[in-house]
């Protein structure tokens, strides 16, 4: 029972981050499940099955609060679904012990990218005259993001959100809402791929239920908070969390001593703390007393 409560809290926290940042539900949840000893394919399958419900709740909430660009959602759904299905079948065919370190490396890279995006791109402004993506431009983006999402247990948001923010002439809350809403189709396709490849018996149903419960509670709250909380702070927090969580798998694979591992954790935590302080102090929004009213529209 205690483990289920912890998983529900994980689902709640992950959905709060994902719903207000446009990324990291799958990455955060999968990282913590890998730490708990779940095989990569089973962990990713459990997370994606939970996401079928949480992304539906998140999408409905974002639509209600006006955070969605319907055209972008429709152009991402098909390629994202195809990529996720292929990725699920690919991951299911690999031995769990062999692929686990590589999945952790992938997740660490995503964490580094998230930190980079929100630490060193804070002051960049999107071009006012940028044109919306065409269907041909969104096709490879959806395929790649869907494939990485299924193989890594997360990746849809970290790949699509920064790209859309860089190219689209959209408010950040619109990007986040559109990415979260389109992720429902990705989660469904990935789950179907895992069911075909692994079978229903590989899914930890109690774990899935706990993740779902936490995510459903958090979804409407996150859709509301996306208009209030500075997304750069959440980005730095989740990026550091992903890196520190997944570095454990790599250190155990190498076989380092506990003292050495503790030293590495301490150094990473120190850099993480510095990054958080830098993000808070250097962001120009902090000089504007009105930033909390529309902080994500930078």
Image (spheres, rainbow, N blue to C red):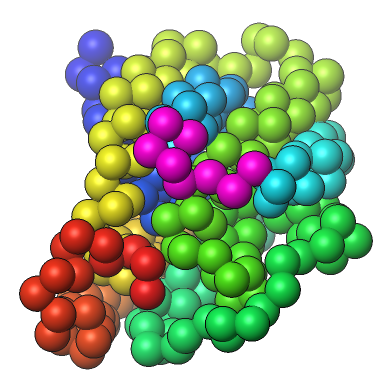
Residue 122 falls inside the magenta stretch: no
Residue 48 placement, left or right of 282: right
Where on the picture, by quarter, is residue 36? top left
| Residue 127 seen anywhere in this rendered image of the structure | yes
Instruction: Tell whether position 68 is magenta.
Output: yes
Examine the rendered structure and indicate whether residue 54 appears above or below residue 80. above
Total marks in image: 0
Residue 285 relative to residue 71: left or right:
left
Can the viewer see residue 244 in this picture? no
Q: Which of the two residues, 142 or 270, is positioned nearer the viewer here?
A: 142
Position of residue 72 measured from the top left corner of the image (x, y, whole percent): 69, 51
Work out which residue is located at the far front of the displayed protein and give it. Answer: 129
Q: From which residue to which does the magenta span run?
A: 63-70
User: The C terminus lies in which quarter of the figure?
Assistant: bottom left
Residue 43 located left or right of residue 98 = left
User: Residue most toward the left?
Assistant: 289
Residue drawn where x is 77% and y is 53% of the image: 142
Where's the N terminus, which quadrant? top left
Q: Residue at x 29, y 24 (%)?
A: 217
Please name the residue shown 83% across and 19% down the image. Answer: 196
Q: Toward which corner of the image does residue 263 lie, by quadrant?
A: bottom left
Compared with residue 242, is residue 260 higher up or lower down, i.e. above or below? below
């Amino acid at each position: 029972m205690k483990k289920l409560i912890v998983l529900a809290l994980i689902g709640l926290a992950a959905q709060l981050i994902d719903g207000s940042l446009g990324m990291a539900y799958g990455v955060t949840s999968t990282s913590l499940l890998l730490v708990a000893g779940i095989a990569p394919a089973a962990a990713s399958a459990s997370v994606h099955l939970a996401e079928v419900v949480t992304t539906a709740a998140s999408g409905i909430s974002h639509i209600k609060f006006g955070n969605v660009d319907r055209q972008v959602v429709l152009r991402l759904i098909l390629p994202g679904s195809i990529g996720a299905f292929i990725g699920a079948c690919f991951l299911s065919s690999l031995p769990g012990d062999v692929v686990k370190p590589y999945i952790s490396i992938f997740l660490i890279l995503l964490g580094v990218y998230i930190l980079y995006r929100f630490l060193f791109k804070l002051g960049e402004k999107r071009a006012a005259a940028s044109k919306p993506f065409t269907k041909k431009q969104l096709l490879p983006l959806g395929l790649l993001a869907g494939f990485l999402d299924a193989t890594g247990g997360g990746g849809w948001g970290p790949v699509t959100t920064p790209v859309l923010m860089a190219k689209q002439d959209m408010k950040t809350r619109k990007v986040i809402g559109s990415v979260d809403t389109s992720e429902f189709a990705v989660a469904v396709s990935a789950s179907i791929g895992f069911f075909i490849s692994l079978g229903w018996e590989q899914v930890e149903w109690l774990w899935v239920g706990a993740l779902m419960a936490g995510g459903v509670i958090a979804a409407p709250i996150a859709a509301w908070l996306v208009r209030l909380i500075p997304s750069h702070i959440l980005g730095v927090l989740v990026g550091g969390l992903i890196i520190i969580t997944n570095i454990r798998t790599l250190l155990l694979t190498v076989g380092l001593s506990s003292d050495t591992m503790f030293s590495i954790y301490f150094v990473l935590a120190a850099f993480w703390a510095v990054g958080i302080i830098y993000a808070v102090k250097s962001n120009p929004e902090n000089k504007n007393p009105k930033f909390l009213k529309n902080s994500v529209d930078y």
